[in-house]
Image: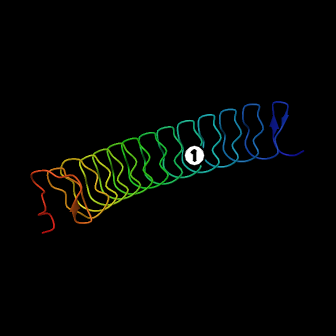
Amino acid sequence: MCGAVVNGCVVMCGAIVNGCVVMCGAVVNGCVVMCGAVVNGCVVMFGAIVNGCVVMCGAVVNGCVVMCGAVVNGCFVMCGAVVNGCVVMCGAVVNGCVVMCGAVVNGCVVMCGAVVNGCVVRYGAVVRFGAVVMCGAVVRGGAVVRDGSVAFTDLYTKNRLFG
């Protein structure tokens, strides 16, 4: 139709690729590049060069596709902070875990609220011995207090939590 002569093939426009038809763009080893950068034999729609992989947009992650955000060791990060090779939707960095929002709990997901030793706190106070507080109260000695009353009694809580 028009264009350059490639070993017996028709090239509509662009560069000469080893016997292949290149619509437009850069020369990739025998592959068709619609537009963008040269990736080792792979098609890059647009964006950065990732080792032989297709990057839609964003940063270069070791051979992986990053839609947007930070560089996580070869993992897919939608947005947010860098967590050791894990996907963080938003919020704080938790050791390799996904934190939706809120505080950092040792490797656990905290929906919102205080830091409880490896436990999930919906909202409220700090639990010293790993219990889950649904709302509001101060827990001492591992007892859960809800709405000002002792749910689980022990020698340390009695009725003095809200006295």
The figure's colour scheme reads: rainbow
Q: Position of residue 105 (x, y in %)?
A: 28, 50
Q: Residue at x 42, y 45 (%)?
A: 72
Left or right? Give the position of 28 relative to 123: right
Q: Toward the viewer: 129 or 82?
A: 129
Measuring 31% from the left and 61% from the top, which residue is drawn there? Answer: 113
Query: Left of 13 or right of it: where is 151?
Result: left
Above or below 97: residue 41: above
Query: Disc 1 residue type?
Result: Val
- The quarter of the picture where the C terminus appears is bottom left
Residue placed furthest toward the bottom: 163
Residue 42 percent coordinates (x, y)? 63, 37
The image quadrant that residue 15 belongs to is top right
Residue 4 drawn at (x, y percent): 81, 41
Q: Mark 1 Cα within 10 Å, few/some/many (few <14, many 20+)?
A: many
Under tag 1, what secondary structure?
A: loop
Identify which residue, 145 or 20, lies in the foreground.
145
* Residue 163 appears left or right of 78: left
**Mark 1 lies on residue:** 55
Identify which residue, 97 or 26, lies in the foreground: 97
Kindly give the residue lying farthest to the left in the view shown: 155
